[in-house]
Amino acid sequence: MKTIDARGVPCPKPLILTKTALTNANINEEIEVLIDDEVAFHNITDFLNNNKITYSNNGMNFKIIKNKELSQNESSKEKSSGPVIAVVDKKAMGQGNEELGELLLKAFLGALKDASPKPEALYCYNGGVYLGIDEPYKSLLQELRDAGIKIFFCGTCVKFYELEGIKVEEQTNMLGIIEAMANASAVIRA
């Protein structure tokens, strides 16, 4: 059994190490992944579930059995039929007057739930993570959740800005954001 010790390793490296180990492993080979970070735990769990990989966990430690080959070309095949996603990287939309930019962002967030096609998810990174704690943005994000749009925040950004109140289950990493953008049929930018 191969062991990946990713304790103390910042995101998204634990997920990357897990993916690399799975890619290089033989079918039915067992891999142990040791982590100590809730966001990394959530990211690895999502990856394993989305790829239907067999695993068990004891606390934050995983025992993974490679039960199938991982497809390297799924993203290029799914691009044209992939989901629409939206991304926000600050608390204002566009360049220029900040007050106008804030009004535009509120309108943008309010309109997302009625857009056709409706985005599957909204990814917030850099200053965009403040939307998760500042009103009226926080209420607008709840309306998007209620409309079935998943909300994700960059975990590194949340830690950098020392924000509290953003659920760990809604935190992702840069690799997750890149893959979502690469697999999307369209990316709507605020």
Image: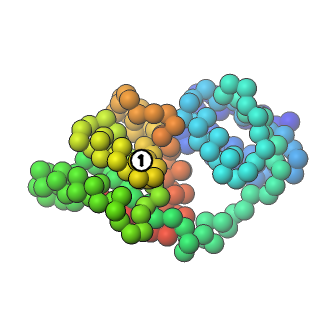
Is 118 or 82 nearer to us in this picture? Answer: 118
Q: Decide: few, some or many residues near mark 1? Use Cα within 10 Å; few <14, some 14-19, many ≥20.
A: some
Indicate the quadrant where residue 163 lies: top left
Q: Is residue 189 visible?
A: no
In this rendering, position of residue 156 left or right of residue 57: left
Quadrant containing the N terminus in the rendered view: top right
Spot occupied by residue 164 in the image (x, y as percentages of width and height):
37, 28
In this rendering, position of residue 70 left or right of residue 122: right
Spot occupied by residue 21 in the image (x, y as percentages of width and height):
75, 46
Q: Is residue 186 visible?
A: yes
The single residue placed furthest to the bottom in the displayed view is: 80
Is 66 or 52 nearer to us in this picture? Answer: 52
Q: State whether residue 6 is above or below residue 16.
A: above
Spot occupied by residue 145 in the image (x, y as percentages of width and height):
41, 47
Is 136 or 51 nearer to us in this picture? Answer: 136
Q: State whether residue 137 is above or below residue 8.
A: below
Count of marks, rendered view: 1
In this rendering, position of residue 104 left or right of residue 38: left
Q: State whether residue 87 is above or below residue 164.
A: below
Q: Residue at the spot x=54%, y=57% of the render?
A: 179
Q: How is the image coloured?
A: rainbow
Q: Residue at the spot x=29%, y=42% of the render?
A: 139
At label 1, the amino acid type is: Arg
Is 159 or 123 nearer to us in this picture? Answer: 123
Spot occupied by residue 101 in the image (x, y as percentages of width and height):
17, 55
Quadrant containing the C terminus in the rendered view: bottom left
Q: Residue at the spot x=56%, y=30% of the render?
A: 38
The single residue placed furthest to the front in the displayed view is: 146
Q: Residue at the spot x=34%, y=48% of the render?
A: 143
Which residue was labeled with disc 1?
145
**Element carrying mark 1:** helix
